[in-house]
Image: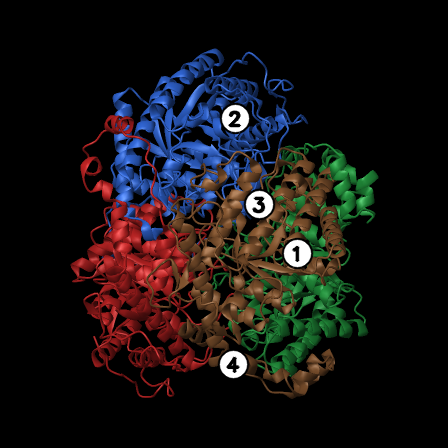
Chain colours: A blue, B red, C brown, D green
Amino acid sequence: MSTKLTLGSKTWFPNIDPIAYEGPDSTNPLAFRHYDAARVVMGKPLGEWMRFAVAYWHSFCGNGGDPFGAPTRPMPWTDAVDPVQRAKDKADAAFEFITKLGAPYYCFHDTDIIDEPGTSLAEFEQRMAAIVPYLKEKQDASGVKLLWGTANLFSNPRFMNGASTNPEFAILARAGGQLKGAIDATIALGGEGYVFWGGREGYLSLLNTDMKREREHFARFLTIARDYARANGFQGKFFIEPKPCEPTKHQYDFDAATVIGFLREFDLLGDFALNIEANHATLAGHTFPHELQVSADAGLLGSVDANRGDVQNGWDTDQFPVDPIELAEAMMIIFQAGGFSNGGINFDAKIRRNSTDPEDLFIAHVAGMDAFARGALAAEKILTGSEIPGMRKARYASFDSGDGKAYEECGLSLEDLHKIAHGQGEITPASGRQELYESIVLRHV
Amino acid sequence: MSTKLTLGSKTWFPNIDPIAYEGPDSTNPLAFRHYDAARVVMGKPLGEWMRFAVAYWHSFCGNGGDPFGAPTRPMPWTDAVDPVQRAKDKADAAFEFITKLGAPYYCFHDTDIIDEPGTSLAEFEQRMAAIVPYLKEKQDASGVKLLWGTANLFSNPRFMNGASTNPEFAILARAGGQLKGAIDATIALGGEGYVFWGGREGYLSLLNTDMKREREHFARFLTIARDYARANGFQGKFFIEPKPCEPTKHQYDFDAATVIGFLREFDLLGDFALNIEANHATLAGHTFPHELQVSADAGLLGSVDANRGDVQNGWDTDQFPVDPIELAEAMMIIFQAGGFSNGGINFDAKIRRNSTDPEDLFIAHVAGMDAFARGALAAEKILTGSEIPGMRKARYASFDSGDGKAYEECGLSLEDLHKIAHGQGEITPASGRQELYESIVLRHV
Amino acid sequence: MSTKLTLGSKTWFPNIDPIAYEGPDSTNPLAFRHYDAARVVMGKPLGEWMRFAVAYWHSFCGNGGDPFGAPTRPMPWTDAVDPVQRAKDKADAAFEFITKLGAPYYCFHDTDIIDEPGTSLAEFEQRMAAIVPYLKEKQDASGVKLLWGTANLFSNPRFMNGASTNPEFAILARAGGQLKGAIDATIALGGEGYVFWGGREGYLSLLNTDMKREREHFARFLTIARDYARANGFQGKFFIEPKPCEPTKHQYDFDAATVIGFLREFDLLGDFALNIEANHATLAGHTFPHELQVSADAGLLGSVDANRGDVQNGWDTDQFPVDPIELAEAMMIIFQAGGFSNGGINFDAKIRRNSTDPEDLFIAHVAGMDAFARGALAAEKILTGSEIPGMRKARYASFDSGDGKAYEECGLSLEDLHKIAHGQGEITPASGRQELYESIVLRHV
Amino acid sequence: MSTKLTLGSKTWFPNIDPIAYEGPDSTNPLAFRHYDAARVVMGKPLGEWMRFAVAYWHSFCGNGGDPFGAPTRPMPWTDAVDPVQRAKDKADAAFEFITKLGAPYYCFHDTDIIDEPGTSLAEFEQRMAAIVPYLKEKQDASGVKLLWGTANLFSNPRFMNGASTNPEFAILARAGGQLKGAIDATIALGGEGYVFWGGREGYLSLLNTDMKREREHFARFLTIARDYARANGFQGKFFIEPKPCEPTKHQYDFDAATVIGFLREFDLLGDFALNIEANHATLAGHTFPHELQVSADAGLLGSVDANRGDVQNGWDTDQFPVDPIELAEAMMIIFQAGGFSNGGINFDAKIRRNSTDPEDLFIAHVAGMDAFARGALAAEKILTGSEIPGMRKARYASFDSGDGKAYEECGLSLEDLHKIAHGQGEITPASGRQELYESIVLRHV
């Protein structure tokens, strides 16, 4: 799992040394206090559980621009005029960052790794053909692996009305053409997963939308993508990433339950799993642990996009995760689900627009990885050393035998329940003891 | 569809005459300005489309209490000491109100029609046995019908941890016992539907909850309820009413998509449909039209709980509906879905805590029915006389023939799309023209 | 108030004719159905009440880009290479649009009317010196007037930590330098107001912020701006535009009450009033009418930024206003406050990213102006012909004489109230009759 | 500051021993792990900083009822038939709880300490006269003190339209009569503060409301209350507790900034300060630290109502505080403001409806006090041992001398800024380093 510092022809983060684990007493914001990849937790090295990935888009393409202002961030790797050279410089910067950070994985959209030319698909494919082998070299040199790839089918103006849910077939076809290239690149780079994030697969206005038809087109798109990838040797998982809205008013992949229902409706359960993003969970009115649990209960917890939203601001702020309580609860669920197979923890998070020091990006990732590690260590203690697992199991004990068990095994009818109800006295319900559960969690974080 | 004024032994709303249709120029808040039940709209009398129902709980049981204050509302029909007499007085008041209003239907929870005694199920069943025939008489005398019945499995303290999702089997059994009685009453009164609203079927804390097991218990509960009702002659529909939260932190019936996924997962699609409530839609982060459309697209638009929330207040305010634009969009969807078969439009709405004049309840219902009628009249004009249906159809025309049609019919692979993409030039996407659509809607409301 | 069609050397909206009033039966989306500027409403021509303004930024600078995608909108007036020519083309397009629409006013930020050069303030001032006289010519030729001007002190990266609340004095000084130019331009063009919108005057993190010091700097900035403008002949009003957040996590001008408190604290009440934006009101947890009423009650209702938000989406969607009920309630408040003196109704609204037909911008403005006009016509009927004003006055009648009046006139102590309370029997409070009020409003819209 | 275990004639919490400090390694949920009252923090014993108070209403009156269900909680102290005996039993239970917990203060509404009789003010005053001396005895015996008192002017139906903002003078007078009694009781019991929480001082509908007149009545009410209390020897502070809504749609005390503006407008700044509640802050769209900072910056940070809301649920959930990061940030502000003089930290928090074990109330308070103590210990480390105070100070250093200082001291005009701007080169703004600040906070929590 360990990676090797991999620089390009020049250094893009000259003043930053590789990040080391220094332990809880360290006061160095450029060192890990909790994340010790080799430490065995719940029977496996922490690094193997976490499978941290760096997101190409936020970290190497995000320029600090927002709807009210121009870019703020110094990004010297974007200065070259030649697009392929620019892409290689970016790759060099990315792999320097990733290997200094010590993350074992990265993730990208096709348009992250090389800029799209004007409108020609052929030209874009030529560019992709130039950069993919270069990334392969960087991967080989560093040991860094591709967690997942994806296609950006939402930024180009042609996709303003959606890609696979576009009312115009020609644009859907164009999206398919581009999708093929992104799948090809993911396969070529050994990606363990392929993500669909439904950017503009939704609607801005229901008045002009045939939602039923759009959803069917969407399902068809996923189906042929799956068929193509499987036919071309892709062994990994496809991930759908729920998000309720933004940029569209409503996205079809609203939340985990919606996506699971969709996959079941269109018979896609076998090949697809979910990529749960914390900020998307909260935008949908759920907690991050809730969305993880819904996915885990369905056997579909595939991967995680790690970040956090801002409780007071109603858009996708994509801040780095920091909350140790939330992350302990998240890691409890991830551990109980057996961890990730093809997925991992990808930092779909960005530094604030006014965080313009080169070290800010390192500090943010270090703190985020540490926050997850701290959550993992607490989760282990709660699961293996606290009263919580037993208390929760005992709460449902009446279904483990007798009539309760018969009920679970479909052996009781409504009339049976009616008879039982008449035969029993009034039952005083047991306290839910929520404050005690919370107190125990707090004790371990 | 017309009903007959039906009073009890005394008059409970002495100063209110039956509500008449007086037309758009009326300034009488106790007359309909838009709701003319006999008027033919979209080929059928408006009354037959709307199937308005009055909710027993808000209108005859709701006392104006809130978490910060005591009851405010004069409710003389609750004064009798004997519970059966009290229930009959309430029924008299209810049927006087319903027949003065001219609504063809009503809806109830079992505990609305008669008060629960202490803890004995047998005693409650005796009370039910006393009131159900009385309601039957009132129905027969008035022509008012039961749209749907339901059981209140959330108010009693025994259900504080849920009913069918309670961690204790004994409480689940008690819930089943009570459910049987509510189904029996619904059948006896010729109810066209039976509603499940998942009051406390959810969780307050994920920490103490086995969500997977609870959801499975819930599905089982619905299954045996369905089996029992079918075996006992119930021909109507079962409705599930989505709501995201309140009173629990999270309700398993979060929204329409979640419920549809649940019904599909547990093989309940045939007998169940959805009862969409406007305020629950907005609490879930959706519009009311969205939830209707999701249900209609799945062929599951069963019934409507008419009300509205308050955009600034984050709880279930259950105000009467007033917004003619929202209701026009809602009626467009309802008309296009063919209207209701077993369902209707039930006013799950309450007058404000400080609306304490007896006429306030009438004014609120009249305005609500008028607002829906106005929406229906506008929807008819939009669907039959405006550019919108054609514009929307044209937007998807590329899927009606050629490659687009082949795509819909599963005739194209990803490689096919890739080839098409290479063969076509850049497509300038068409304007979504949202402002034009909105302008046309406004023109008709 | 009437303006004259004013084209530049070429036509930018060749297929659009000047918008005419065609009356309620028109089905032409490019005609007014309600907005008849000459119609006398509440004793004054509608046009004089409304004082509609077109916003330069959204309509002529906004390109359809969003955080997830590139520009979508055809904007041929931005093609010229020379910045001054580009600015003149934009002015030509703007005045063509404004005069075809028939709006009497426009509004701008300094950086809207001409692009900022690299970093030199001197060079920007030269550009401003080139475009301001050209705008003066256009104004004179058309009769269109400047409602208000403002400085964009938030888009340039230098302002990423705020302008007048920036922790670095040098940046505050730069902001002051730019502000002077915007005030000069506003005076030169006869602007009736000058707006401060607190773009990044707030914080992203409280941890690194000295809020007290920043607010004091902000107050000082407003003070010296006022002093400068007054010394240089500005007779109009300064407007502060409340907004709770976005782009910053928290903006100091959170809402109307906050701004009024700020103006009072720093002794700025005389020269400043409020510019209330509908979408900002809802982001702050208020209704648009609430914010108008708060401002009006303080004698500070200065101007309006007309738009609407999306109830389900938590960011500043700036959609065009359409809701006739909300706008009727808004116009009731505006009428009762005596209308605008220096302010007006500025469309701070943008067409959707996928509204790319040139006519979409016209349709949106026409519908928005019509929606406000419809609201105004309804408001007149409610205020002059309905029971509402009398009902509301009667509700407070007990304070118009006797003890109630004595209380209002500071003539009663707590002991007096205590004595009165003992002397009176229990009072049954009167119904608030909210549903009746709502019913009456609905009857008139 | 230490209190003495004080039981009544019987024990109400028989299985609970007094709570002790056992240190961070304790696994006993009925022991403090962080709250060591005697430990000196920031130069003063922790107990003196925190001044914890128990809220009578939630802890001894709250029965677990909610809008969807009946009471759930066993409350044996409410069983006595005689109202005075019932009140004494409740007082006994309360003081047993408070002294077992070791909290030095309590808080109440008048109607918490004894039930209101029907409608007679005289009879209520007689009841108050019976219970206040009993509470005095309990205080004297235990050493527990009254942090603040208040009057419940919102639960009784007579106040359904408000108390001091009621449209009917007679009801306002009744509120004044009751208020006098609550002030008298607070004085008699040595209360250090008197709180106004604006329950129904707001509106449900703007349509029927004269907001200006209501606010003026409210200000007058506060004024005469202040005058009465001062004339009768009250030396403490009056606190206003902001809340944006619930139970009313809009409360006039929306947030800290609104209240401060109100106090300044009506010349009440000298005697009044703010009581900041965490859950009310978040309902208003603010963080808890934000509201504390706004109050502290105005010199008006008076007291704290400790609790938390639920981010996904939009009503006042009043859960016990648990988040150590939020509380560390809160305590940083409280420490920097010099702590409380008349106020303290009152647990305006309730156990969940399904937390029905007697020990749940203890566990919740212990965890809440511990969470605050943990926040305090972290805050001390951050303020005295971390880089944050210095980093923040340095960020504003340009205002500590030279032109920046001149600006702060009102020595620069807009023309001066303009000149400075021209004389300086472009300034690259400094990184806000938010992620570093957050990383440092995390290191200490």
Q: Quadrant of residue A146?
A: top left
Tag shown at residue A60: 2
For the residue marked with disc 4, what is the amino acid?
Met
Distance of label 2 from label 1 (alpha carbons) = 42 Å
Residue underneath mark 4: C391
Tag shown at residue C113: 3
Nearer mark to the viewer, of 3 and 4? 3
For the residue marked with disc 3, what is the amino acid?
Ile
Nearer mark to the viewer, of 2 and 3? 3
Q: In which quarter of the image is residue B76?
A: bottom left
Residue underneath mark 1: D276
User: What x and y, as percent, mark residue A326?
Assistant: 52, 39
- Left or right: A419, with A79 as reference point: left
Residue at the image position 44 percent from the left and 23 percent from the top: A114
For the residue marked with disc 1, what is the amino acid?
Ile
For the residues beneath circles 3 and 4, the answer to whether they share a chain is yes
* Chain letter of the residue beneath label 3 in the structure image: C
